[in-house]
Structure formats: structure tokens, C-alpha cells
Image: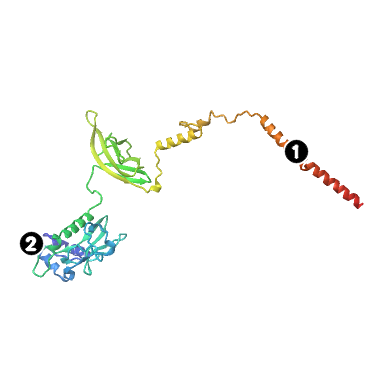
Amino acid sequence: GSGEDANSHIADMQRLAEDGNGKYYPILTGHAGEIGTMMRSELKGPNISEFAFKEEIITVPNEYYSHPILEGIKGDSTQNPYDRLPTVTGFFATREKTAQKGKPQPEKILQAGYVPLYVQWQYGNGRVGAYMSSLSSGTGDGFSGSSFLTDPQGEMLIENIVNTLLPTTDIAPHDIDVVFSEDNYTTTMSIYPKNLEENDNIRIKIYDPGQNPNDPTVTPTTLFWDDTARVAFETKQAGVYTIIVEQIRKDNGGNDVVVASEELYKAFSYSREYHTFVEVDVIDAYMSDLAKAGLGKVVESESPSSVFSDMDIVLHMTYDPRMLFIIISIILFLLDVAVRKFKFKWIHEIIRDRKERKKLMEHKTV
């Protein structure tokens, strides 16, 4: 705490320091030079000095071998794939933090000896990384961290740490905010212009992957509800879609003027087994070949049911039965010859013989 009225807030400042496991130092106006002295004394205090180390070899736990902060640093050793990391000197071990409710546990990515050197965890919607070392070239007691920071691998590590902690989304204010909502291969954009005036329009230019940059799909819209425009488009082709949202306003001459613009990118991909998008030309060619194979033709109509309106549902044909009767006569003639030749009996003859045999048996019994 600093300032002439710091004493009036001592209780509040002390409570804040205690909540952060820290210590409250009052600094009055005109005594800002004491801050450095207080910081040095704090580093030499028992709460900090027990975490100070002079020289240790950096190691990486197995589960973090592929972590982004180690990109480009991998060494050749089989026991420690990151043996190219320099030996760290003059550093303070990082205290483990307690994860926030619903957040993953802190990641102890770098170890120095038996203590954590760099720890990263999620805080709110962002990330926090903790690393602390001496920046001096030496204090006479061997406590120096400059050799690590000036080493090429150490510089790369620090750069990777910074890049990893940077936000993944643009946090700068924009004249137009766009929110994407995906449903399968349909994407809906909710567009929120900041300075919307009456009769303003929104124009959207969508460039499909590989599309000619001079031939975008232009989607104008004037649908506003609570100063919001909503536009849906389909992403059937895998790749990166470029989307340009423009806020259009009429000038005094009645010409369209772009008063705000936002360029965004939308990536879309899917596995081959989910590829159900067939080109219309391919379907037309297949149906045409299929119709020709069946001696038919492709009928193009907006009303499919009308195709059958003029169709005759009765199959008309003329048949000459003489050939059938000639074939039947020949078969019956050959059959009669075979019966007479081989003494075959017709069915009525077999029935007649059985009846006569039955009567004869009855007569003998009497």
C-alpha cells in the first residue's frame, strides 16, 4: 500500500495480502525507493529462501514430452529427450497452486532436481505460468540465472512459454462482433454491429476453400432483431472458409459505403466415412446412364408425381396362340405313341382296373 491515506486502508490491505499468502508493506508518499529494498529482503526471507536453488539439471516428466513450450528443443537422449535444455542456476522453485473449482490440475511441466521449475495452470478463461530466477550475472555466491536466459535453448523456451500463455482469441475490441453456432454442416452467424444506424445493412462474403478470390458467395441481409443479424450457410467442403462481414450505409449521394468490416475464418473437416456430399452433376450423369440402360430417359420436372399423369397403366400386347397349340399337339402325339408302345396305362384305365379287381374280390368272398 502507498499514499498518504494508506493507513486508513491498512486492515483491507492486510486482508488482501493474507488471502494471497503474502505480506503487507506500507509505503508512504516519497518513499518509493524502499520498494526494491523490501523486495530483496522478501526474497531472502524464510518463506522464499527455502525455495532458492543455485544449480540443477532440468528434466521433463513423460506426460509433457509433447507440450507446446518444448517445441523445437527436443534432444537426442533416450532417458531425457530434452537434454538440450541448459542447466538452470539461481532459480526459485515454484509453489504448487490449488486448482479452481471445475478447472484442471496445474501442470508441472519442468522439473529442476526434485522441485518444480515451471508450472502452468488455468485461471478464469486464461492461463498463468510461474517461473522465477535471478536475472543477474552473479552476486558472488553463485546465485545467477543469466546463463539460462542467454542460452539459445533457454531463449526458445521462454519464447514458447510466452506464446503458450497468449490468448487464443482476439481480445481487441471490434466494430462488428460475430458468434458462430455449428449444427452438423450448417453454421449460423450472429452478427452484432457496434454502431448500427437506421437503414444500415449487413453484407456477408463467403469464400469456400479453393474458391476464386474474385468470386465470393455474397449474402446480403437486412434481418435485424435487437440490433442482431443472423445468417446461416453450409460447409460441405473440407477446408478453411474466409468470411468477410461488412456494415453498409448509404451516403448523401445514395451510394453504398462500407463503414465497418470484419474478416473471419471458419475451419471445417470430417472423416471420410461421413462424406455424404455428392456433386449434382455426378448424380445427373449416373441417372442418365441408368435410364439409357433401361431403354428409358431422364425426365426433368418440378413435380415428380406429374411423370405418371400421362402414363397408360394397362400393358397392351397382341399374341398369336397357333404356335402354342402346335407345340401342345406335338407333345400329346408323342405321349400317346409312348403309351401305346410301352403298354402304359392312362389314369382312367388304372382307376377302371382297380374297380373291377375290387368287385371280383367281393364276388369270391360271397
Q: Which picture quadrant has residue 126?
A: bottom left
Residue displayed at 8% across by 69% down: 140
Locate residue 22, reporting x and y percent: 19, 65
Q: Mark 1 or mark 2: name the one nearer the start of the chain.
A: 2
Q: What residue is disc 1 on?
A: 337
User: Mark number for residue 130?
Assistant: none
Locate residue 18, reporting x and y percent: 21, 66
| 141 left or right of 80 in image | left
Q: What residue is disc 2 on?
A: 33
| 342 left or right of 219 in image | right
Locate residue 341, reporting x and y percent: 77, 41
What is the basis of the colouring in this image? rainbow
Kind of residue at disc 2: Gly
Q: Is disc 2 surrounded by few (<14), some (14 to 19) or many (20+) residues within 10 Å?
A: few
Is there any visible trace of residue 194 in the rendered image?
Answer: no
Nearer the observer, 180 or 77: 77
149 lies above or below 212: below
Residue displayed at 87% across by 47% down: 359
Give the foreground label among 1 and 2.
1
Nearer the observer, 85 or 148: 85
Nearer the observer, 81 or 165: 81
| 135 left or right of 60 in image | left
Q: Which picture quadrant has residue 162?
A: bottom left
Give the SS element for disc 1.
Answer: helix
Give the SS element for disc 2.
Answer: loop
| The N terminus lies in quadrant | bottom left
Q: Which picture quadrant has residue 233?
A: top left
Kind of residue at disc 1: Val
Q: Distance between the residues labelled 1 and 2?
A: 137 Å
Residue displayed at 89% across by 50% down: 362
92 lies above or below 176: below
